[in-house]
């Protein structure tokens, strides 16, 4: 027992070290070199529902339609959740005599009817398959049937494909690495597009193997960066830590996928749920609700419906993620799954976005200088918008302090340029620039 858990811990920390090294190598060697999978769809992050975490295999056509109706009633479709995605367990284990993948006749008697019902309701419809022999739950996978299955999914009316990583064929069968294994379906979707005019959003569920953030964008619209999310703070903190090193991988048409939104599941507190939603939205991850929407509280519906934060996730001018500008508790670039980076920012259509996360188990004041962010201008003051209280919070001159941020809580701010800062402020050059501050006549001030 003790030995086993020790072995598990070792595996886990070895994996973390491996991830940290590969992430740093990526940051150094591959700035923005990956070509996007731009087939005309999937420019912005998907928003909607995925059936797995809510229903697992207890899923069927009427439950999916019921979910779509519930999302309308709760106003979730109106704020942008317009994708309804099946996950595993819709198929039979065996193919037909002609090799066609078949839906389970009890659970999903008529896929065409399902997609047209969803389309009539104003949704897009998503389906799931696997790059290996079988899905993770043991139903037919698409290996060596990629084009055939993609055509089947197209003929049923689906618009989105999530593609999993279970039941990998032996090396002497596949003779490909991870990239080649996923390239097969990516190529098949291109063929289907040429044949039928249907373009799929392609979502890799590949758990972050083989540095998928290096190559995922060349053949898909999103790629999972980590194992399955769990509805507790440790899992959220660990995923936030992972993404903090690879934010450069995200842009229009391709993005890090942090897994489903677990708001309403497990033991997440109100503040943790807000942090979860904020981080996922502002790193431009897909926003796919993983909870049984019929059980969502009004408070959780309100979190998921924060339109000012959704607007940034769906920003049509900037496709890039926010990134940490200071780790905070730990030194910059420290890989720590419990205490990830705390101070983040990024550009948006309407100004600079800031996200502050209090990773401590007690409330804390959180301070930053504006010019710590690469997306602000020295000598300019900024108006402050709080994206959770939906209030204008005055003007920030040189710095900002959020007081008493709750444990595991978040602050999300939008700052807009608001004219020159007042004259006479000291030091003459704020922040990092102070050490190089120089007058025009050459007198060094710093
Ligand atoms: C669909 O699933 C729900 C929830 O598991 C169940 O109550 C219902 O009877 C199922 N319907 C059909 C047609 O199987
Ligand atoms: C599925 O295929 C396997 C292997 O060919 C076969 O043994 C099994 O009987 C089939 N199951 C059904 C329900 O047809
Ligand atoms: C089509 O779907 C609707 C909504 O789920 C359902 O009421 C209807 O019975 C289905 N029709 C067929 C032919 O399966
Ligand atoms: C929440 O659940 C996780 C396991 O799912 C557990 O490790 C953690 O201690 C729980 N946290 C609280 C505050 O109950
Ligand atoms: C920018 O502001 C406009 C006007 O309020 C709003 O419609 C839009 O969604 C905002 N965009 C972002 C990315 O916040
Ligand atoms: C994570 O950071 C905390 C706070 O600095 C530190 O106490 C802890 O030892 C770190 N954990 C690891 C695994 O480095
Ligand atoms: C924050 O900026 C103000 C000017 O607005 C300045 O007076 C104050 O000293 C700064 N605080 C810190 C800690 O740098
Ligand atoms: C912004 O102002 C509101 C209303 O006064 C307040 O509740 C909130 O805490 C402020 N936000 C920050 C980050 O200080
Ligand atoms: C903020 O700016 C002040 C004034 O330039 C400087 O003394 C301080 O070290 C800076 N703090 C951080 C966290 O950058
Ligand atoms: C250089 O410029 C600074 C700032 O304007 C001024 O304070 C200083 O007296 C000047 N020095 C000389 C040698 O002119």
Image (spheres, helix red, strand yellow):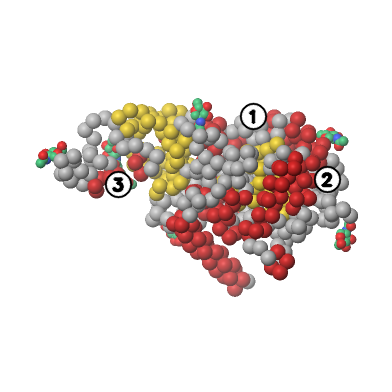
Find residue 432 and name its label.
3
Report the residue at 52% width, 54% height from top. 242
Q: Residues within 10 Å of mark 2 (few under 14, many from 20)?
A: some
When asked about the image quadrant of residue 153, the answer is top right
Report the residue at 72% width, 59% height from top. 132
In the rendering, at what x and y percent does residue 307 appear? 55, 31
In the rendering, at what x and y percent does residue 270 appear? 55, 41
Query: Cβ of disc 3 within 8 Å of ligand 9?
Result: yes
Report the residue at 47% width, 43% height from top. 322
Q: How many marks?
A: 3
In the displayed orientation, state which residue is furthest to the front: 194
Q: Nearer the viewer, residue 182 or 331?
A: 182
Find residue 167 and name its label.
none
Can you identify the residue that label 1 sits on? 78
Question: Where does the N terminus fall, quadrant-wise?
Answer: bottom right
- Of labels 2 and 3, earlier in sequence is 2
Residue 231 visible from this viewpoint? no
């Amino acid at each position: 027992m003790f030995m086993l858990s020790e072995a598990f811990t070792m595996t886990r920390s070895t994996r973390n070290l491996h991830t940290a090294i590969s992430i740093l190598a990526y940051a150094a060697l591959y700035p923005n070199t990956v070509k996007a999978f731009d087939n005309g769809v999937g420019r912005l992050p998907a928003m909607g529902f995925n059936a797995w975490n809510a229903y697992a295999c207890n899923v069927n056509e009427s439950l999916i339609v019921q979910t779509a109706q519930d999302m309308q009633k709760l106003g979730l479709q109106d704020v942008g959740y317009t994708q309804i995605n099946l996950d595993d367990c819709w198929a039979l284990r065996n193919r037909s005599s002609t090799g066609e993948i078949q839906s389970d006749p009890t659970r999903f008697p008529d896929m065409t009817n399902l997609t047209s019902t969803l389309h009539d309701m104003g949704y897009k419809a998503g389906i799931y398959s696997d790059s290996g022999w079988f899905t993770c739950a043991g139903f037919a996978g698409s290996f060596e049937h990629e084009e055939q299955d993609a055509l089947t999914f197209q003929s049923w009316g689906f618009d989105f494909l999530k593609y999993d990583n279970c039941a990998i064929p032996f090396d002497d069968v596949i003779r490909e690495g991870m990239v080649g294994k996923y390239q097969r379906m990516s190529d098949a979707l291109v063929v289907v597009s040429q044949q039928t005019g249907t373009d799929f959003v392609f979502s890799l569920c590949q758990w972050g193997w083989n540095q998928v953030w290096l190559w995922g964008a060349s053949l898909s619209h999103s790629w999972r960066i980590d194992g399955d999310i769990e509805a507790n703070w440790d899992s959220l903190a660990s995923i936030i830590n992972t993404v903090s090193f690879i934010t450069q991988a995200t842009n229009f048409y391709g993005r890090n996928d942090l897994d489903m939104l677990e708001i309403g599941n497990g033991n997440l507190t109100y503040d943790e749920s807000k942090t979860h939603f904020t981080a996922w939205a502002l790193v431009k991850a897909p926003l796919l609700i993983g909870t049984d929407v019929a059980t969502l509280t009004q408070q959780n519906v309100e979190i998921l419906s924060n339109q000012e934060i959704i607007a940034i996730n769906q920003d049509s001018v900037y496709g890039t993620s926010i990134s940490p500008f200071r780790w905070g508790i730990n030194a910059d670039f420290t890989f720590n799954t419990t205490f990830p980076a705390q101070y983040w920012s990024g550009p948006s259509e309407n100004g600079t976005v800031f996200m502050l996360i209090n990773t401590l188990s007690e409330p804390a004041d959180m301070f930053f200088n504006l010019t710590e962010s690469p997306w602000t201008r020295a000598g300019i003051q900024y108006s402050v918008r709080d994206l959770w209280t939906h209030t204008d919070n005055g003007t920030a001159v040189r710095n900002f302090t959020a007081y008493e941020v709750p444990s595991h809580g978040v602050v999300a701010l939008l700052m807009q340029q608001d004219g020159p800062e007042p004259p006479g402020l000291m030091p003459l050059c704020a922040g990092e620039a102070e050490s190089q501050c120089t007058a025009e006549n050459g007198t060094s001030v710093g």
